Image (cartoon, rainbow, N blue to C red):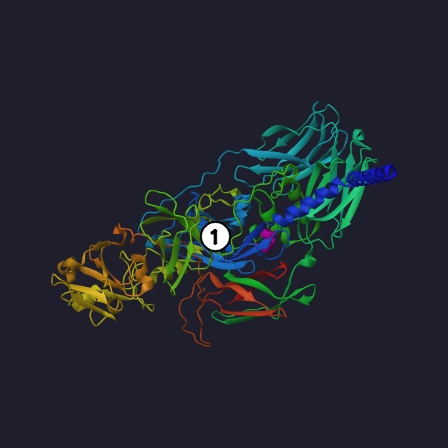
């Protein structure tokens, strides 16, 4: 028995020792990589790009856009969110208009009409999803556009617009910053130091630098060579301090101290000039040799695509890895110490042209005639194989709409560069127009001197990850709270949501213990009107309903300082003058917002009969509408309505007064007369005889349950609006327990207008469009084929076609070509 106990103890001890050995053999660095992988799975982010039809606009025009939303981890069209918010923001950082765009497979489109009530200025277009709000507005799509006002629009404008002059520093102050490669200077280790010089206008400034030690001895001199950026080599000695003497364009000088070197540490030196591989050199201080393995990882969108370990026995370690299978975009190299602390970091850009979509047109348009029909057929491929995709196309007359190609933002500049770098990037498209050695070197300078945006190691290792506040928004939510009149929550109360804006629907739910309710997964258009009805668990309707309102995202300061123009009209003078015929035509047709049309225009659309009333469903949204012209010969309501409204008649009450009823109400045991609302106030039926028909502007009859529900009745409602009555005089609430509600819904994009010309016809009307054609959703078939058609405007010039988009796997493509119109 004793022997058996000894064997059990020995077996237990062996198991313990084996477990201890297993624990000791766990690799902390592997744990860190696993933790990073888990973080990526649970914190997939989104980034947004908007393709705009042109780079700047004038009052009276439309901004047409298509949104492309990518998942940052998979680099594929995002399936995280189905709802996108797009804001038009003025120079006072006020949101002038917000659109809610439905997304399908990471894409959606819309438009802004620049009404004449707007002032010219430096506007911003900002786009983001609810999910993106968790990581802050610095990750939103945010583009500055100039909006001017033509001479014709100024004539048409009948009110004084407030002009805002953006404040830009008038001083010659220049900011000079130094960025040691990898993050820090280390004594006795040569390091490359990046330089970035930015003026008060946000643009790069080229200067001369003389690098000196603390004794004033010049060690080297350089000139910044590209938009205020450059670099130099320094081997800091122990105990030495260093300065850079900057000479500015006006001849003035300034002495700037360089960063202080650490006594020991690690330095990264990265060579990204080879088109086939990335070469990395790791240099280690002598005091840190032999402390264990250092580790290097390369990440793209937080995905680890390369990792290696090396013994710290040697002071210089070299490694490399191929670029062939790395997608285009920013690559982040991080060096870890033997105890797994990040010691150095470097960004580089991978420009792998093989992962771009091939966009091949069958035949590019040659010289063409005005008003000619253009038919374009193109084929999309990836890795030489056909692939389906979704694209947007814009055609401009660049003889009027001048293009600064270097400063142009596009699907590559935004999704591969701007979305992952902090701060303003000057002339972003410069880095994509050529892949020569000079451009690659200048892009590498940008990587050295521009901060990383999306991930901070210090917070990650300390588990300081911001909690998720907003969940991905698939569809819209209508929510609120029901309380008693004394403010106590109504638990297990019934809440009904009803609308008849397009077609009648009704759904209901129950409140929770706190009186809260929510209708989720809602898809409804803008201007949809709802009625919300609430009752207690016992069916009492004497309750208060408060709806949740989504607050607008706070507007941060404009970070695109280099794109701000103090005098917008002067900056756009060429465009505005060359487009003046177009704006004159808009004014003639009465299409410039507040303009007064002095010429005859044939109105095709039906004029809305009622524009001012207290109708909770919206003015004119009724089963029957009668205007003042239709009422002026009628003596009373009975004569005006009987025989003209199905099922409506009048009955005498005990006082001998004529009271309106609907037939469907008469069939019930408890007869309910129609409610009567006069200028927003419910009046008693015994006041009908006092109504003077000639004083009425309109009568709206709500006979359907969908429209009358909001008034708490199924017996119908008569809404009377006097000639003195106004819609904004509405000062009553709906029936007890019922609340009218008009939330912002999904925007329905308008159709881009395109005239169709008859072949051979010479007397075509004036056509001065600047955007000749816009189509946001050109879809290829399974073989990658697609086409689009449009007509040239009735003006000569050089026409520019821009086609861009992506396939189902997030591979990007862009094609630009021009042709002459005679």
Q: Residue 57: in sight, yes or no?
A: yes
Q: In the figure, is residue 556 to the left or right of 430?
A: left
Looking at this view, name the residue that lies furthest to the left. 656
Rendered image quadrant of residue 696? bottom left
Q: In the figure, is residue 653 to the left or right of 817?
A: left
Position of residue 654 relative to residue 318, above or below, is below
Rendered image quadrant of residue 616? bottom left
Q: Position of residue 134 (x, y in %)?
A: 54, 45
**Location of mark 1 (residue):** 86
Q: Position of residue 23 (x, y in %)?
A: 77, 39
The stretch of residues the image draws in magenta is 410-415
Between 683 and 412, the one lying in front of the other is: 683
Q: Position of residue 319 (x, y in %)?
A: 79, 44
Q: Main secondary structure of the magenta part?
A: helix
Position of residue 351 relative to residue 197, above or below, is below
Between 24 and 606, the one lying in front of the other is: 24
Residue 551 is inside the magenta segment: no
Q: Which residue is drawn at the image coordinates 62% and 68% (left, top)? A: 784
Q: Residue 800: in sight, yes or no?
A: no
* Mark 1 crowd level (few <14, some 14–19, many ≥20, 10 Å Cα): many
Between 297 and 713, the one lying in front of the other is: 713
């Amino acid at each position: 028995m004793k022997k058996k106990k000894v064997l059990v103890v020995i077996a237990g001890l062996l198991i313990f020792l084996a477990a201890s050995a297993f624990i000791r053999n766990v690799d902390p660095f592997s744990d860190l990589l696993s933790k990073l992988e888990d973080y990526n799975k649970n914190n997939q982010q989104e980034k947004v790009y908007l393709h705009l039809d042109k780079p700047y606009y004038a009052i009276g025009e439309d901004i047409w856009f298509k949104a492309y939303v990518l998942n940052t981890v998979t680099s594929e069209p995002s399936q995280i969110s189905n709802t996108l918010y797009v804001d038009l923001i003025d120079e006072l950082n006020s949101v002038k208009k917000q659109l809610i765009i439905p997304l399908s497979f990471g894409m959606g489109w819309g438009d802004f009409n620049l009404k004449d009530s707007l002032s010219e200025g430096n506007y911003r277009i900002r786009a983001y999803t609810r999910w993106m709000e968790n990581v802050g507005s610095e990750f939103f799509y945010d583009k500055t556009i100039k909006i001017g006002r033509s001479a014709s629009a100024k004539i048409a404008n009948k009110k004084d617009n407030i002009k805002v002059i953006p404040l830009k520093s008038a001083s010659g102050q220049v900011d000079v910053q130094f960025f040691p490669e990898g993050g820090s200077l280390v004594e006795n280790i040569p390091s490359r130091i990046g330089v970035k010089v930015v003026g008060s206008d946000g643009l790069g400034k080229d200067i001369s630098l003389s690098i000196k030690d603390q004794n004033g001895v010049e060690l080297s001199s350089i000139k910044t060579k590209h938009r205020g950026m450059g670099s130099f080599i320094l081997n800091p000695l122990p105990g030495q301090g260093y300065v850079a003497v900057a000479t500015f364009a006006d001849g003035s000088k300034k002495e700037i101290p360089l960063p202080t070197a650490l006594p020991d540490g690690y330095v990264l030196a990265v060579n990204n000039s080879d088109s086939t591989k990335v070469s990395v050199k790791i240099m280690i201080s002598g005091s840190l040799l032999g402390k264990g393995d250092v580790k290097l990882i390369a990440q793209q969108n937080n995905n680890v695509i390369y990792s290696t370990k090396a013994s710290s026995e040697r002071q210089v370690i070299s490694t490399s890895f191929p670029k062939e299978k790395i997608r285009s975009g920013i690559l982040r190299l991080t060096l870890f110490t033997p105890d797994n602390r990040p010691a150095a970091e470097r960004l580089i850009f991978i420009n792998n042209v093989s992962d771009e979509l091939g966009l091949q047109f069958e035949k590019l348009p040659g010289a063409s005639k005005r008003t000619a029909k253009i038919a374009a057929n193109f084929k999309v491929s990836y890795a030489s194989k056909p692939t389906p995709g979704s694209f947007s196309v814009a055609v401009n007359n660049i003889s009027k709409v001048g293009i600064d190609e270097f400063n142009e933002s596009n699907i590559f500049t935004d999704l591969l560069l701007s979305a992952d770098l902090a701060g303003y990037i000057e002339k972003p498209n410069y880095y994509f127009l050529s892949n020569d050695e000079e451009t690659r070197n200048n892009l590498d300078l940008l990587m050295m001197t521009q901060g990383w945006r999306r991930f901070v190691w210090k917070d990650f290792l300390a588990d300081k990850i911001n909690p998720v506040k907003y969940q991905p928004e698939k569809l819209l939510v209508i929510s609120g709270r029901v309380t008693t009149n004394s403010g106590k929550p109504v638990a297990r109360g019934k809440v009904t949501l009803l609308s008849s804006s397009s077609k009648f629907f009704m759904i209901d739910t129950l409140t929770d213990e706190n009186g809260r309710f929510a209708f989720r997964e809602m898809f409804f258009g803008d201007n949809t009107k709802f009625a919300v009805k609430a009752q207690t668990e016992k069916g009492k309707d004497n309750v208060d309903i408060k709806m949740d309102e989504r607050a607008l995202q706070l507007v941060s300061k404009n970070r695109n300082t280099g794109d701000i123009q103090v005098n917008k009209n002067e900056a756009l003078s060429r465009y505005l003058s060359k487009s003046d015929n177009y704006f004159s035509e808009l004014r003639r047709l009465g299409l410039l917002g507040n303009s007064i049309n002095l010429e005859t225009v044939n109105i095709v659309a039906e004029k809305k009969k009622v524009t001012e009333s207290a109708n909770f469903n919206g003015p004119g949204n009724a089963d029957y509408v009668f205007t003042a012209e239709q009422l002026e010969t009628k003596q009373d309501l009975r004569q005006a309505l009987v025989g003209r409204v199905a099922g409506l008649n009048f009955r005498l009450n005990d006082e001998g007064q004529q009271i309106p009823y609907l037939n469907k109400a008469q069939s019930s045991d408890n007869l309910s007369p129609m409610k009567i609302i006069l200028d927003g106030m419910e009046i008693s039926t015994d006041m009908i005889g006092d109504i003077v028909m000639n004083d009425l502007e309109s009568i709206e009859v709500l006979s359907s349950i969908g429209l009358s529900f909001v008034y708490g009745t199924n017996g119908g409602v008569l809404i009377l609006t006097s000639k003195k009555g106004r819609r904004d005089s509405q000062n009553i609430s709906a029936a007890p327990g019922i609340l009218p509600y008009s939330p912002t819904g999904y925007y329905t994009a308008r159709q881009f207008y395109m005239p169709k010309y008859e072949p051979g016809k010479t007397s075509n009307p004036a056509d001065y469009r600047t955007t000749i054609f816009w189509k946001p959703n050109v879809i290829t078939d399974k073989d990658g084929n697609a086409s689009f058609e449009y007509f040239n405007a009735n003006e000569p010039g050089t026409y520019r076609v821009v086609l861009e988009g992506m396939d189902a796997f997030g591979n990007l493509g862009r094609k630009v070509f021009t042709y002459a119109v005679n």
